[in-house]
Amino acid sequence: MRPATKRIPAIENRTSGQRVTHIALLTLTMICILTMTLMLALVLTPMTLAATTSTTTEFEAQQMIARAEKSITDIKSSGHQTPLLDDLLVEMKLDMLYGDYDKVSETYNTTKSHIDKLTALEDMTKQIESLMEEAIGRGINITGVSVHYNIGVGEFKKNSFETAERELSTSKELLVNSLKNQSADMKSGLEALENLNLEQELGLSIINKSIAEVSQYEERDDYMNVFATLSKTSQMNESLHQIIILKETINRLEAEGKRTERFNDQMRELMTLFEEEDYAGLGILFNETQTIIYQAKEVVAGLAEIDQRLASPEVQGIDFTEAQELLEISKEELALENYEKSRDYMDRAKSLIEEIEKEHLLTTLINKSKAKYNPVKFLKENWLYIILGVLMLRFFTKVSMSAGKIAVYEHQIRKLEREQEVIIELMRGLQEEYYLTKEIDKDTYEAEKANFEQRSSEINKEFPVLTAKIKKEQDKLAKVFSFMIRSKKKRRKEKSEESKSKADNQTTKKR
């Protein structure tokens, strides 16, 4: 039989509490429906209005989002975090979804402003870093600059653009002032060269032109070009000083009456390189010229030293004819400014003179030694020293051998102790693997344990053997030093007896 269905009583048949509950539920349902309808209207109305009244097209909005996204990606690839720009990008995409293209354009302008500010700060940071490298290279103290720079970079990474801009601007201002002072010092040093009255001869007009360029860059606050030009001008300055040094050297050599044709040729080449502004080539050529000058000085000094040696009374009577011929050739090459050949002949003459002196000394010694060697006489005169030497050699040999053996045995004991500790650790690991982790079976455990115990037993047997060997060597050393120990004890005993007798005498006097 079909069960009776429970029917809901009619409203008029319900109790008053049920009627109130029913009415409240109906009212709440109507309120929810109205609220959802109102929210839907609020969402759809701006989208409809934006779609009909927007001055920015959908394509333009898409292009703005694409450009902003690319710029943000480029910034992130340089290692900079962009949480603010990411939020703005999300906001642009939501406005795009709602169809509010004007809002997309407005947010894009804000995003672009932040990107421009970030890019400007990035450029300022790179510019400051470049100027700091320039300042460090010129030995300028940039401690204060570094403090503001580090704070600015830290704030920059936190996206605190205003604070970062303020700190970076301060560091740039301090750095520019320091560099400005440095440039002033450099310019004053360059302008001082005008007092040398070498403008027509050495082309100082080039440097004056560079100084004028530096002043123009400073008026525009273009300090990158200021120091680029100053760096180039410093190379000019260095090259100019090198030319002056060479000119002074040539003047001195001419005053001494020496030939300077080769140096004058070098001088003309240096001037050509200076006018062509090839300062690197000028420096290389100057170093080569300086090397030639040093060679010339060494040759002149070496020849003078050899002449002085040949004129000394100690070598009179020795035949140096061949060496003197080499010296004459060396002097001729020196007069022709062939300094390399001159030095080569001088070195050969010097070596030959030393060989001749050694041969002469050896011949003299042979001629003076008339008495023959007599071994019997030698033994009679030195028998005591020979015996003492043998005894000392035997003493040191015994001591060193015993000490060496003791050191070897002690090292072997330490090695066995370390091996014993390793075995203990391995036994612990083996027990953990067998009892705790169950990684190995009983047969493996028993086999490994037997191996460890066998090796441990062998080690325990080796300990007394090594200890006995050490004791044996120590006894040998004790025998060697026994006479020294006995004599030391004897001195102590005599000293104690002497002090005791003095104390007895003082006691007797007091009584």
Image (cartoon, rainbow, N blue to C red):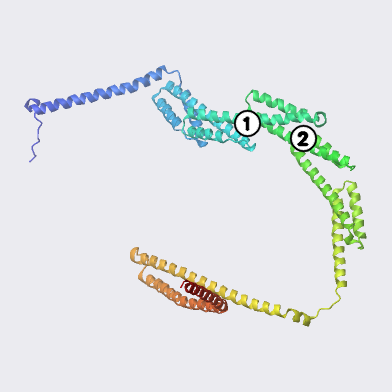
Residue 72 locus on image (x, y percent): 49, 32
The secondary element bearing badge 1 is classed as: helix
| Relative horizontal placement of residue 28, taking residue 128 as reference (left or right) | left
Farthest-out residue, bottom: 376
Which residue is under mark 1?
A: 179
Q: Residue at x 68, y 25 (%)?
A: 215
The label number, if any, that marks residue 268 in the structure image? none
Q: Residues within 10 Å of mark 2 (few under 14, many from 20)?
A: many
Which residue is under mark 2?
A: 240
In depth, the one of 108 and 317 nearer the eye is: 317
**Labels 2 & 1 near each other (Cβ < 8 A):** no
Residue 415 locus on image (x, y percent): 49, 69
Viewer can see residue 231: yes
Residue type of the residue flagged with mark 1: Leu
Q: Quadrant of residue 282?
A: top right
Q: Quadrant of residue 90?
A: top left
> Which sits earlier in the primary sequence, circle 2 or circle 1?
1
Q: Residues within 10 Å of mark 1 (few under 14, many from 20)?
A: many
Q: How many marks?
A: 2
In depth, the one of 103 and 235 nearer the eye is: 235
Q: On the rendered image, what quadrant is the N terminus found in?
A: top left
Viewer can see residue 63: no
Residue 97 locus on image (x, y percent): 40, 26
In depth, the one of 495 and 465 nearer the eye is: 495
| Relative horizontal placement of residue 314, taking residue 424 as reference (left or right) | right
Residue 161 locus on image (x, y percent): 48, 29
